Amino acid sequence: MEPDWASLPKHVLDSVLEKLVSLSDYLRFSIVCKSWYYVAKDNQIQRAKMTAPMLLICANKRHSWNLYSIVDDKVFDLQLSVPNKRYCGSSFGWLIAVEKNFAITLINPFLRVKGRRKNENSIIRLPSMRLPPSNSERRRWSRRYHHYVFKATMSADPITDAEDCIVVVIYREFCQMAFIRLGKATTWTYIDTGVDRLGTLILEVTNVKDKFYAVDQKFRLLSFGVTAESNPNVEVVACMTRRPALSKRYLVYSIEKELLMVIRYVAYDGGKRSTVGFLVFELNFDKREWVAKDNLGDDVALFVGDSASVTVPASKSGCLSNCIYFVHDNDRNGYDIGRRYHLDLGVYNVESKSISQPYTSHAKSLVEMTDYEPVWVKPTLNL
């Protein structure tokens, strides 16, 4: 008698799923039969939390992006039909971009695979943002509108959890903030970040539960809640006395329920930028101060970049533990990033303080030739 694989108990299939590291293996599991599909579907939300981000690399063809898996160490044999432009954020598998009319667009690249029927929910169009006040500024920004928003993030999936989805952006050269609640507002609310008389330039923002946290150019940590359409109160939570030069900073809410500030040290040589090291700090909420960390944890992998900064369990995602995966992102130190200058990517080992380049030659060549910065994006299963 042949085994009846379709009748295996659910708890057995759940155990099998827990041991699958590669996303491609998970998808293969889901197409074995109907019963296996429903087990995979029931586990897809939990699986998404454990899945490592993938790297989107523009193919320099109209609406064509390649998808590179760090875990599988390969470029998938498919292309995603996504506009060729700079993306200022990536949250819950969605890309965030600015249009010519200064409107914000959310795009799910995994619902736009070339050769397949595009999902009608793959694009969400938000209202236009407030225009620059003078005609000269408007003309200047119209030539580089894709940089009008420096960074954007979301609090929830805009389709499956639209009621709780808030989009927050850092915009214009003065790095101000604005937000909009999906389905509850038709205009953007602009946040007054003037916690002192001089105001402040916001350089990073992330969501933690019912609050957003931001870091300014003075390395101050700010927080604000979004409970109504009125301007939220912004308060200073913590300060960092040492202000590293030639560095970038990222805020990450880790899988261990820690708020981390990751400082990335860079150097320049002939216009090219290279990462030389990282420092990681954890916020002590009670003492309202940053505490240096000498490791991420035995089972934590960290991904940083302008588009997204997240942590995943190393053992269940197939990533290297206690390591920081970094990608070339938007430069705020006065150096223009052009074609063939996106090669500041690699993996930093926090314990050994060493940088490795585990990416395949195929992936490196694609990154070298692209006109746009690569983008970290968390894959959505959508079973």
Image: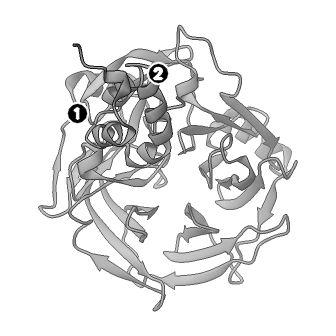
Q: Tell me where residue 262 appears, x and y as whole percent.
A: 37, 65
Determine whether 4 is above or below 154 in the image.
Answer: above
Residue 98 occupies which quadrant of the picture? Answer: top right
Q: Which residue is drawn at 33% across and 30% down?
A: 8
Q: Please name the residue shown 66% across and 42% down the image.
A: 160
Crowd class of label 1 (few under 14; some 14 to 19; many from 20; radius 10 Å): some
Q: Name the residue under label 1.
A: 359
Q: How many marks?
A: 2
- Label 2, secondary structure: give it: helix
- Tell me which residue sits at (51%, 83%) in the image: 238
Crowd rating for badge 2 (residues with CA inside 10 Å; few <14, some 14–19, many 20+): few
The x and y percentages for residue 23 are 35, 32
Question: Looking at the picture, does residue 329 appear above or below residue 78?
Answer: below
Q: Which residue lies furthest to the right in this view?
A: 186
Q: Nearer the viewer, residue 269 or 340?
A: 340
Q: Mark 2 points at which residue?
A: 34
Determine whether, in the image, residue 198 is placed left or right of residue 116: right
> Front-most of 376 and 176?
376
- 42 w.r.t. 182: above or below: above
Say which amino acid is labelled 2: Lys
Q: In this view, does 125 lie to the left or right of 243?
A: right
Q: Which x, y percent locates residue 382?
A: 54, 31
Task: Give whichever of discs 1 and 2 has the lower sequence position.
Answer: 2
